[in-house]
Amino acid sequence: MKKLNVCVLFGGVSTEHSVSEVSASAVLENIDRTKYEVYPVGITESGKWLYYDGEVEKIRSHSWESGKTVPAVISPDGEDKALLVFADTGVQKIGIDVVYPVLHGKNGEDGTVQGLCGLADIPCVGSDVIGSAACMDKCIAKILFEKAGIPQADWVELKLGDTPDFELIEKKLGYPCFIKPSSAGSSVGVTKANNKEELENGIKLALEHDYKVLIEEAIDAREVECGVMGNLNPKTADVLGEIKPAKEFYDFEAKYQSDDSELMIPAPVDKETEDKIKAFAIRAYKICECRGHARVDFFIDRHDGRILLNEINTIPGFTPISMYPKVWAESGMPMTEVIDKHIELALSRED
């Protein structure tokens, strides 16, 4: 049987560049090489695309750019359906069957690369433009969640140039509250404010990462995550995962630079709560037009047990401490099978 040519994209012009490299190394180590010819393409922090033909370990250690690289791009020409590699001997055109983006954050998880794949007429693992863009923008996603009747924490949107209505924010949300860039991932630029001064500083920081800011009430809650896979008929993983952050909240350092946060799989929740979370996850996935796979994050209020939807990640992490691959492994689907399923779903959007 002829192997499928799979182009794995990693890196990217994003604050999550290094996280993408670690996630991609896991995908490259676990993808079934008997089924796929794999073409890794790294995107540098300055935006240069490079075909990388070297050891996976160099990607994990963030040193791949010093290895064997050649400039390369995905051709936007729908007749090519190809990766163009600009070798010294000339341009090599490699036919690509599937693009597998392992890009976190802006310029990768937000619909940009997905749009390129659409132009190129090459199937792309994960959500299309609309699902990627909707979930990347937290404020847009919250409007959709509200439309779907999914409970969530109270929130306020603020854009660059707006004059913050501190009286409204304090009345609606109170303190403490969280300030987040609307379109940044991995908790980059997120702060917790306990008073007006901290709120003002948090808004300034968030606006350094995005023109739009989400201000959200702080919930004393457990953090539970649900893996979802599928296109028009998505399914959840059998088990949920719970995070016990090492710090006050699950920020970038706690997610990727600390071994102190605890992951509990399966999450210790009762059957009724588990079923509600899974149902909300599917509803959120569908209202946002997600495809392929996603991780849907929830809060469980410690005081009254309310289930609140936090956000959807359309390209969840595959790092050693990432929840998404772990809940599927606990559900009987090891990483290699997860990758197979992702590619299968990209090739057949009706499933």
Image (cartoon, rainbow, N blue to C red):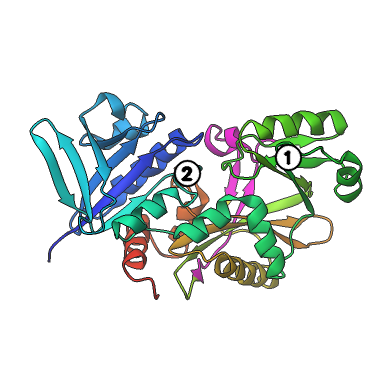
Q: Is residue 261 magenta?
A: yes
Q: Residue 7 at x, y = what percent?
A: 27, 49
Q: Residue 181 at x, y = what percent?
A: 65, 40
Say left or right for 133 vs 206: left
Secondary structure of the residue carrying tag 1 is: strand
The relative height of residue 166 versus residue 324 in the rendered view (above or below) is above
Of residues 332 and 48, the one drawn nearer to the viewer in this rendering: 48
Residue 145 sits in quarter? bottom right
Secondary structure of the residue carrying tag 2 is: loop
Marking on residue 104: 2
Task: Give the amino acid at mark 2.
Answer: His
- Which residues make up the magenta segment? 235-263
The relative height of residue 16 versus residue 112 in the rendered view (above or below) is above
Q: Residue 146 at x, y = what percent?
A: 72, 65
Q: Is residue 20 visible?
A: yes
Marking on residue 179: 1
Task: Give the amino acid at mark 1.
Answer: Ile
Measure how far apart labels 1 and 2 are at the Cα level.
20 Å
Of residues 331 and 123, the one drawn nearer to the viewer in this rendering: 123
Say left or right for 52 vs 170: left
Number of numbered discs visible in the structure rendering? 2
Say left or right for 206 vs 266: right
Q: Residue at x 57, y 41 (%)?
A: 186
Q: Quadrant of the N terminus?
A: bottom left
Q: Residue at x 77, y 55 (%)?
A: 153
Q: Is residue 17 magenta?
A: no
